[in-house]
Image: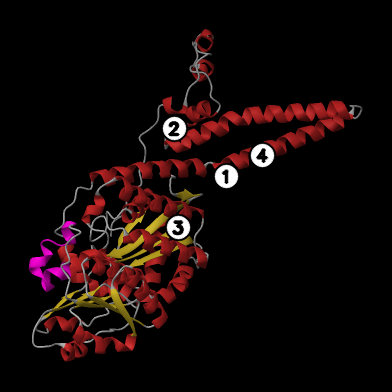
Amino acid sequence: MSSSTRTGSASVLLVGLSFRSAPVTMLEQATVADADLPKMQLSLVDNDVISESLVLSTCNRMEFYTVANAFHSGLDHVVDTIAQFSGLETTQLEPHLYVHYADSAAEHMLKVASGLDSMVIGEQQIIGQLRSAYQSANETGTVGRTLHDLTQRALRTGKRVHSETAIDSAGASMVSFAVDQALRYIEPARALSSVVDDAPSSQPLAGHRALIIGAGAMASLASTHLGRLGIDHVTVANRTLSRAENLVNHAREAGVDASAVPLDGVADCLSAVDIVVSATGAVGNVVTERDVRAAMGAAGTKVLVDLSMPADIERSVADIDGVKLLNIEELTTMAGDRVQDEDPARAIVADELQSFLEQQRAQSVVPTVKALRQKAGEVMAEELMTLEHLTPDMSETDRAAVVKSMKRVVDKLLHTPTVQAKKLSAGGQQVSYPDALAALFNLPNGMVDSVTQPGQADSSAAQTAGTSARADQIPSAARISQVAKEA
């Protein structure tokens, strides 16, 4: 079994739900409020099996990254914790969970950070969401060396994919995709020549007004994208008015007319807008069917975009004439039809994954090397003590010379196996014990055979004494790969 994503005997274990595996209603139930995330991450490590945890929560996925010293008991604990915080039964959850272990878990995080597992292939917003998830877990104290290294590698991979490929053409984020879809209902004709096709002179939302509910990253992206589309005015509503005002100031700096209102002013704003984008962390609905019915006029179409999990906008508003509701479920269907060329991005993921696995394998041998050096130091100390008893008349100068000489011998003997062990580990090879010893001590080709097989001429070793066996030349058994166990 590969030790790439292991710390000692522990491996990365990922359990998740996403728009690909679970219905939106279940995702809403499984979603953990931001305020409860630290408590959940601590609960995940409150046992003898899980040592690290990080929870990635977005509008269409909940993923629980952990480091476990046993697969089955670790999986049981993670699923039980999800059930405890969501109020769902494990029997309800299990059919919709996906599970990745060790190398497969690392590969999945790299794909997620690259936007390859998103509803809109290539979205950039997931990078910021993963960074925030890491910061939250790090502040809580549930991130150790393994998840730190993995997350940093994933963030690096995501940045490379966006800077070195054309995957951004698929859409900067879920927010821009959603707003572009809304445009098709508000101004179908203008949508054809909008910035969806990257025509900067187009102003398809000129003459329209928008309401943004929330003041976080998604709300900020919505404001920016609406501004690019030429929106006349943006109203920002948020529970904390000062945050709404900050977003308004940024919009004005970008040349967009904007104003701020408290969250309880949402109902009063609905009648004056054509498009609503809601992205809050609220637990209940902030826009109800009653509010929307009261705001509907005799003409025009009103599009409501709900990017929250759980939903901000009551589902029944979709039954109102003249209203189009684009929630996560609807957007999932729309995004499913988009096919992009992902090969260059996947090549970068494969490259970064290989580098990460080699790095982890090399690190996995460090404790063994330390133990070997400690043991060598203990043996040397015992021999020096024995020598001191046997040579009481030896001068301090001579004794210091002997100690120095013995240390040099130990260092020289351990240098080669230390370097070779790291090479073997990084190469991910599985070798026999004799081959491993020959590689660790860099024995000349043929030397092992010459001393272990009868009938071999002593000259065989001498003939090859000048040739060193590199670790990558040693015959190895087939490499055992970690395969994700899919639920």
The residue to which callout 4 is attached is 375
Looking at the rendered structure, the secondary structure element under dot 3 is strand
Amino acid carrying label 4: it is Lys
The residue to which callout 1 is attached is 367
Q: Quadrant of residue 65?
A: bottom left
Question: How far, Cα to Cα, is label 3 from label 4?
Answer: 29 Å
Looking at the rendered structure, the secondary structure element under dot 1 is helix
- Say above or below: 438 vs 244: above
In this picture, which residue range is highlighted in magenta?
A: 181-198
Q: Earlier in the sequence, mark 2 or mark 3?
A: 3
Between marks 2 and 3 in the image, the one whose residue lies nearer the viewer: 3
Where is residue 110? Give x, y as percent. 35, 52
Question: How far, Cα to Cα, is label 1 from label 3?
Answer: 18 Å
Amino acid carrying label 3: it is Ala
The residue to which callout 2 is attached is 431
The residue to which callout 3 is attached is 68
Where is residue 361? Give x, y as percent. 46, 42
| Outermost residue, right side | 393
Label number found at residue 153: none
